[in-house]
Amino acid sequence: MRLVIGGCAQGKREYVLSKYRLPKTAVRDAALHLSQAAGDGPGPVVIDHFHLWVKGCMERGESPRELFLEFLKEHEDCIVISDEVGNGIVPLDPGGREYREGVGRLLTELAARAEEVERVICGIGQKLK
């Protein structure tokens, strides 16, 4: 697995497509549902909007960690793209804080497991791991 993080609208998806020479059809929008992220074409599955998928799981009372670890068993070469949601102003409502912490903790675990971790800022990738 590879993990690509960065702020909103920083060019993460375009960076991944260019770096790995993948077609746009390789990208699956995890905000819809992770099961729809399973690609059937050659090459790795690119999962975009991972942070929104985590939010949806939390809203439904599901465990994003357990569901994603199960997904990884069949898609260990996937590329995960996620916004960093832990920067900036701390949300006032408890649900917003819980979401922010949940995404951060899961991304921390994924980063530890990942073969490679990059942060993209202004379309430029910076290798972290």
Image (tube, rainbow, N blue to C red):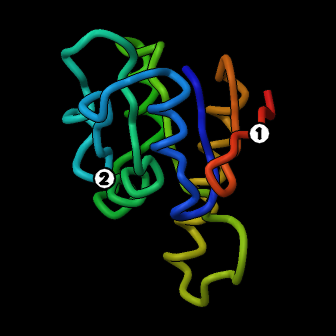
Image position of 64 (left or right of 93): left
**In the rendered structure, which disc, 1 or 2, sits on the residue that comes first in sequence?**
2
Image position of 125 (left or right of 46): right
Image position of 49 (left or right of 94): left
Give coordinates of residue 112: x percent, y percent.
72, 27
Give coordinates of residue 3: x percent, y percent.
60, 33
Where does the N terminus fall, quadrant-wise?
Answer: top right
Relative to 122, is 120 above or below?
A: above
In the foreground, 21 or 45? 21
Residue type at mark 2? Answer: Ala
Residue type at mark 1? Answer: Gln
What residue is shown at x 42% (from left), y 32% (from top)?
Answer: 68
Residue of label 2: 31
Image disc number at residue 126:
1
What residue is shown at x 62% (from left), y 43% (from top)?
Answer: 107
* Furthest residue toward bottom: 92
In the structure shown, which secondary structural element does the residue marked by tag 1 occupy? strand
In the structure shown, which secondary structural element does the residue marked by tag 2 occupy? loop
